Image: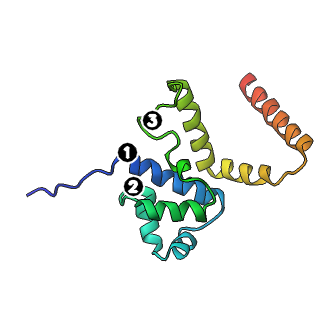
Amino acid sequence: MLENKKKPNPIDIHVGSRIRLRRTMLGMSQEKLGEALGITFQQIQKYEKGTNRVGASRLQNISTILNVPVSFFFEDAPGEQAAGGAGFSEAASSNYVVDFLSSSEGLQLNRAFVKINDPKVRRKVVDLVKALSAEADAE
């Protein structure tokens, strides 16, 4: 007899990936988040993979610990439509941001960038990155 393993719900996978995204943005380990919630890091892994569904009260606790509103975990969720009816280009651009912040380089760049307090320096960093990307396109 074949084992009938249920696939995780796409929303559960999305919420889990957003938990992981925010946790890594803060430089927090699964173990630290688990400790703050009074659960094991293995449970955090299951949440982040979407294998286990996060209950409402637990999601509220996670949002407090990670310092984001609960709505953060549902942004760009599968099947979600913005009030104006978000198109594919908007969904693709937000996925690009999630992919970027999920990469080691993107995470490092983001962490360093948010530590820059001077708006003029931030602008120069953005200009530098644009110039470098234009240079890469020209090659």
- In the rendered image, which residue does mark 2 sit on? 50
Callout in the foreground (2, 3): 3
Q: Amino acid at mark 3?
A: Glu
- In the rendered image, which residue does mark 1 sit on? 10
Towards the viewer: 74 or 136: 74
Q: Position of residue 70 (x, y in %)?
A: 53, 53
Q: CA distance from mark 1 to mark 2?
A: 8 Å
What quarter of the picture does the N terminus occupy? bottom left
Towards the viewer: 124 or 11: 11
Query: Residue at 39% of width from left, 51% of height from top?
Result: 12
Give whichever of discs 2 and 3 has the lower sequence position. Answer: 2
Give whichever of discs 1 and 2 has the lower sequence position. Answer: 1
Q: Amino acid at mark 1?
A: Pro
Callout in the foreground (3, 1): 3
Q: CA distance from mark 3 to mark 1?
A: 12 Å
Q: Position of residue 81 (x, y in %)?
A: 47, 31
- Left or right placement of residue 3 versus residue 138 in this view: left
- Left or right placement of residue 57 versus residue 67 in this view: left
Query: Residue at 53% of width from left, 42% of height from top?
Result: 75
Check disc 2 and report its element: helix, strand or loop. Answer: loop
On the image, which quarter does residue 56 sit in?
A: bottom left
Query: Residue at 72% of width from left, 25% of height from top?
Result: 137
**Farthest left residue in view:** 1
On the image, which quarter does residue 79 sit in?
A: top left
On the image, which quarter does residue 67 sit in?
A: bottom right
Q: Amino acid at mark 2?
A: Gly
Q: Which mark is residue 80?
A: 3
- Left or right placement of residue 24 versus residue 125 in this view: left
Check disc 3 and report its element: helix, strand or loop. Answer: loop
